[in-house]
Amino acid sequence: MREKDHLRLFKIALTLSLGLALSIAMLLVHGQVTRIENHPVQIPSPRLEIPSSPRFEGIGPRPLARFEEKPNDLLKHALSEIKTTPRGDRGKLVPALLAAISREEAEELRGNFSSLTLPAQLVDPSAITALVDALATKNSGNAALVLLGMRRMDGFAFTGSDINGLANAFSIGDAILRADLATLLGACAHSNDHRVLDVLVKALSGDKDAKVRSAAAAALAEIGQESYSKTAELAAMALGDALTKDDSNAVRSAAAQSLYELSAKARPAAGAIVKSLGDNDSQVRTYSLFALPSLGASAANAIPELVAILKRGDDDEASFRACNAVESIGPAASSAVPALLELLKNERLRNSAARALGKIGPAASPAVPALIQLLKSANYDDRECAAYGLGGIGKAATVALPALEKAITDERNSQGAGNPGSAQEAAGMAVSRVKGD
């Protein structure tokens, strides 16, 4: 090869080398990652302050850093470090992660991340166990709870030892920690683990802080809704005790709301719910009233109070709920007929009243003339509910047969925006029931 060719090749190689060096230098300035011969090179940012702690030795590609960004950025960066650690070993990094987050930062993280999914880097048995263990540590407990408290924790379940750790933390943490622990147990623990139930019942009945007791009440509703009958029964009984015995309006209100959310599973607490209709707190009375329709005939003792609500007629929402409760109680609520008959004059409540009269049955026969008039209403829902009520009264509504038979052929009753033909169908069923077919 000629000397000129060698010189030209040397210049090309030199130019390429200088260009590559310049590119690497630019990447270094910007703190980015480049690859040379397929081997990753991590360039640390000059803002990082690397702690010299033996906890970091031999774990991961490089130690966790104390970032100077806002707490949410801190968590993101710290989690990115954990991500590079093999599953099963991530629990070793949790203490360092928690040490990097102060209590104040944990509170900010709570606001920023409370509704997010637990980061995938921490959905690892070793990491979960390490976080649970950290709850008992004075300086790290709050931050650990923030991470565990990220609400949608799909992908893992607490083990028995984890639940024991959560339970033990109740005796160590402050009121805020205990309240959040109760919420965590309700949202994430296996609903049929008796230890969870025991911890929450103890917190509801014995914790000195009303916020903790309120959180325990809400958590009992969650595990009660998802559990088998015995656990749900015990949860309902504990909530019933709190509803009638706790001296805090907030706790009694939380207990009443939880019983409402338990629906039919709240029946073991029916007596407490009925008693609380006369509570001195309006929220307690409201949630107790809301809970009644799911109790069925077991709420029969509430009839006097329900009749009083219907007669007052000063609160349409309360009257509506009372109608629903009377409907669920059925024939035993016959003393409510006069008040329901009066409600047939109320455009907003007459459909609920008509259905309740139908559930009471033959004892509601004094309402037949008014229901026949309602069957002729220009309102589709009025006609459907009137037919339903007359059918429930049965043979005692024989005088309504001509009107019901006419309703079957009424073209207006074959329409209906929500459920076409339902008024026509209700009229047909009413005819069969009145005739005794």
Image (cartoon, grey):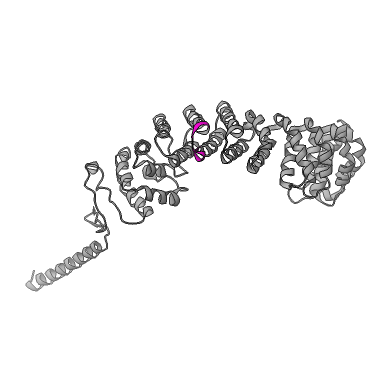
Quarter of the image that includes the C terminus: top right
Residue situated furthest top in the rendering: 230
Magenta-drawn segment: 205-212
* Residue at x 82% of width, y 35% of height: 392
Task: Find residue 133 and report its image quarter.
Answer: top left
Q: Nearer the viewer, residue 302 or 387?
A: 302
* Magenta span contains residue 101: no
Quarter of the image that includes the N terminus: bottom left
Predominant secondary structure, magenta span: helix
What is the number of callouts on the image?
0
Provide residue 184's location: percent of width, then percent of height: 46, 39
Provide residue 50's location: percent of width, then percent of height: 24, 51
* Magenta span contains residue 206: yes
* Residue at x 59% of width, y 30% of height: 241
Provide residue 279's location: percent of width, then percent of height: 66, 38
Can residue 327 be seen at all in this image of the molecule?
no
Q: Nearer the viewer, residue 12 or 397?
A: 397
Task: Find residue 391 and report its image quarter.
Answer: top right
Q: Nearer the viewer, residue 360 or 42?
A: 360
6 left or right of 73 in image: left
Q: Is residue 292 above or below residue 382?
A: above
Provide residue 404's location: percent of width, then percent of height: 88, 41
177 left or right of 78 in image: right
* Residue at x 90% of width, y 39% of height: 400
Residue situated furthest left in the rendering: 3
84 left or right of 11 in image: right
Q: Is residue 407 above or below residue 333?
A: below
* Residue at x 48% of width, y 37% of height: 182
Can residue 10 be seen at all in this image of the molecule?
yes
